[in-house]
Amino acid sequence: MTREWHRPYDELDPGRPLPFRDRSVRLLMASVLAIKLFLLFTEGRFDTLRPDEERNYRIAQNFDAGLGYTINGAPTAFHGSTTVFLYSTLIRAGVAKKTYITIYQFLAVAVFIASIPFLFDLLLQLAVPRGPALVATTVYALYPSNLIHIGNLFNYEKLVLPMLVIVFHGLFVMVRSAGPWSLGRTVLISTAIAVSCALRYQLVPVYGVLFITAIAAARHVQGRWGVVRPLLVTASISTLLLGAILVPSLVKNRALFGHAFLADQSGYEMMQGHNDLARGSWWGDWQDPNSSYARYSREMVPGLDGMNEYEEGQARRAFAWRWIRENPGKEARLALRKLALLFAPRNEGGGWNAVTAAVHGLFLTGLLLAAARRRWSAETWLLLSPLIAVVLLDQVYFVGYRWRYYAEPFFILLAAQQWTLELRARRRSVTS
């Protein structure tokens, strides 16, 4: 990791205004707002949640009806419980599901629009010229997953992704600036992190890797431990807030199954990612008792049908670990297949896409350029940190394009950074 940054520290005032005044940025924000609202009204749904969230809503309804946290009469903690508690509160308050969906859809659009100038400012901080920075920001704003495949459906990813971009901007400025940092801004960032992780547990490793990288980068580049204090305070407040949010889930699940845990889904997902039939991606029909994977599961894990949900998750996890130990060659080939699937130009619920292919190509070639030119600066590692976490998730479980979604803005940022540096170096070599 080199100490080089592409702008001196004293040019980075943590309190400086974002480029909202840039006419082109405002025009882009207005245009994207119009497009997203058009797609939302013409293609969006305001009467139903995603299947996973519909299941959580039914659990909340059952709880409100005095049936406990159950589904089909059986206790369950398969998915995270944060939204179960949220839906239960809404039901008791008399808020209709359609009303909540409508409010949430508009909130998610507003947060995404607000993230656009933050990403543009990150590009400027990476010394990307204004013109290419506007192009890269437009790609982010109109990226297929943002516009259609994830961003136009009801899911919590489309809220936590722009929040991740905004939070990353704040942490990036913390790393680069030796100036003062307000406690109020720290609390806002910490709250955004805690809420994001509570809604989507997969973001815990994403923010964990990001904080580790940011602290190492700040210490390495600026050469003293004092500059990491705002980062440590932010990480500590985030952890405390997240812990407070998740305690009810631990209490609920201990009462249901006798063990304190957040969700038992991970054992099911881990076995999907490590078995003789594994293909590196999700088995869409894994719950169909007649599917090949379901038959394989019953054969490999005796007594599966007689276990409760928690016991089955633990048994599947134990099988996955055993399979990894006993099949190192197959596991290595599967790991490579997962990497290939991760960078395949496909989208959640959709086929191949030319824009996705172009961004992946520019990102991968930019990564190769960074390796070839030894441009492993602190800012490059920061840009890579969400991807590192996503790769770890994919290797532990399987490739999920909703997980890759968290790394996609950073594909754009790193590609723009590396190609800017490369073209600048080539121009210098031509003129010298």
Image (cartoon, helix red, strand yellow):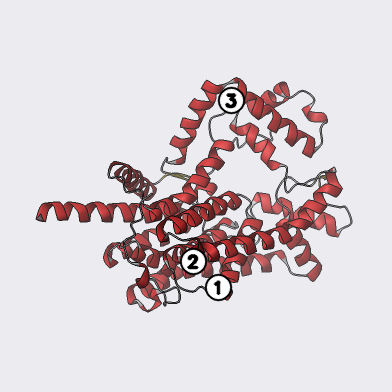
Figure quadrant of the C terminus: bottom left
2 or 1: tag closer to the N-terminus:
2
Q: Would residue 37 be found to the left or right of residue 379 on screen? A: right
The image's mark for residue 170 is 2
Q: Position of residue 234 (x, y in %)?
A: 58, 64
User: Tag 3: Cα neighbours inside 10 Å, few (<14), some, or many (≥20)?
Assistant: few
Q: Dot 2, crowdedness within 10 Å: few (<14), some or many (≥20)?
A: some
Mark 2 / mark 3, whichever is N-terminal: 2
The kind of residue on which mark 2 rests is Gly
Q: Is mark 3 on a helix, strand or loop?
A: loop
In the image shown, does 298 or 252 lie closer to the viewer? 252
Q: CB under 8 Å between callouts 1 and 3?
A: no
| Amino acid type, label 1 | Arg
Q: Is residue 94 left or right of residue 417?
A: right
Above or below: residue 129 compared with residue 62: below
* Residue under pointer 3: 277
Q: Tell me if residue 412 can be seen.
A: no
Instruction: Determine the residue positioned at 26% across, 54% down.
Output: 421
From mark 2 to mark 1, how far is it between C-alphas?
Answer: 9 Å
Q: Read off the residue under disc 1.
A: 185
> How far across and how far down the image is residue 147, in percent?
46, 58
Residue 175 coordinates in the image, percent (x, y): 45, 62
